[in-house]
Image (cartoon, coloured by chain):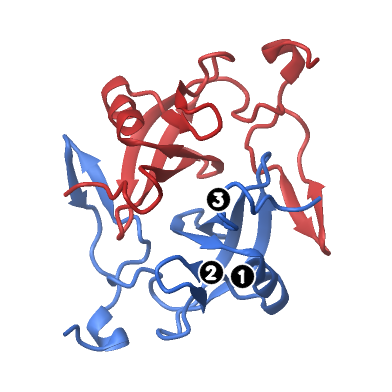
Chain colours: A blue, B red
Amino acid sequence: MQLDFQKSDGLVTAVIQDHRSGRVLMVGFMNEDAFRKTVDSGFATFYSRSRHKLWVKGETSGHRLVVKEIATDCDQDALLVRVEAQGPGVCHNGYQSCFYRRLDNGLWVESEPRAYDPDAVYGSKP
Amino acid sequence: MQLDFQKSDGLVTAVIQDHRSGRVLMVGFMNEDAFRKTVDSGFATFYSRSRHKLWVKGETSGHRLVVKEIATDCDQDALLVRVEAQGPGVCHNGYQSCFYRRLDNGLWVESEPRAYDPDAVYGSKP
C-alpha cells in the first residue's frame, strides 16, 4: 500500500502532533524523499514548497521532532506524525505550536504567550 | 489579518481535531467560501478537490462536525478546527478517525476496529 503523492503535485500533507499532549504543533508537506527520510532517520523532514528542497525540522534551531508514530488516512494522501518535540517550541515565531492564534468574534487573536525568543534562536531579523 | 488562500490554488489545509480527546479525525481543504460557511453555520464545510464543490461534512451520513474552536498557523495557510463529532465516526470507511492505519515495520496496518458499518450509512458499494 503506497501513499498517494499524485493528488497534490508530489506532496502529502503531514500533520505534526505532540505524542503526549495531543496538541497539533504544525502542518507541513512531504514528498516521497522527505517521507522516506523521516522514516529512515526518525526525525520529521519536510519538503519546502517555497525553497523547493528538503528540510529537517530543527536543522537551524535544534528543535527537532523525534518521530514516535506515523499514521495515514483513508485516501493515503495525508500523514499524522506523532512526535516528541525537542526544544520549547516548533514555531519559528517563538510559540510552542504554529497554531497560536484563534478566531474570536471574527478576529484572529493570539491565545498563548511565546515559549522562547525567536531572535535568540534564529538571529535578528533584518 | 486574512488567511492565505493563494499558496495552494485558493485552498487552505484544515486539520479536524476532536475537542475533547484531542484525536486528529481528518484533514480536508477549505476555499474562502467553505471557510466562511464553516464560521457562519458552525458546521465544518470543505471544498472537494475531486468534485469541485463545497460539501458539508455529514450531509449524507448525518455525522456532522460541530465547530468548537478555529485556530490558524503562523503562515495563515492552515486551520486547526476543534470539533464535536456527531455520530460514531468521521471516516467514510467506518472508522472513528480517517487515520486508522499506522506504519509498522514498513507496512501500513489497521490499528483499530470499525466504529460503524459504512454500507448501512452510505448504502452498498456497487
Residue B48 drawn at (x, y percent): 50, 31
Q: Chain of mark 2?
A: A
Q: Are marks 2 and 1 in contact (CB under 8 Å)?
A: yes
Q: Secondary structure at mark 2?
A: strand
Q: Residues within 10 Å of mark 2 (few under 14, many from 20)?
A: many
Residue at left offset 49%, top offset 24% = B57
Residue type indicated by callout 1: Ala
x and y, in percent, of residue A20 in the image: 55, 60
For image coordinates 63% across by 48% down, the residue present is A77
**Residue behind mark 1:** A34
What's the chain of the residue with tag 3?
A
User: Please, what secondary structure does the residue beneath circle 3 have?
Assistant: loop
Give, as a three-letter code, the residue at label 2.
Phe
Read off the residue under disc 3: A8
User: Do the residues indicated by labels 2 and 1 lie within the same chain of the protein?
Assistant: yes
Indicate the amino acid at tag 3: Ser
Quadrant for the C terminus of chain B in the image: top right
B103 to the left or right of A33: right
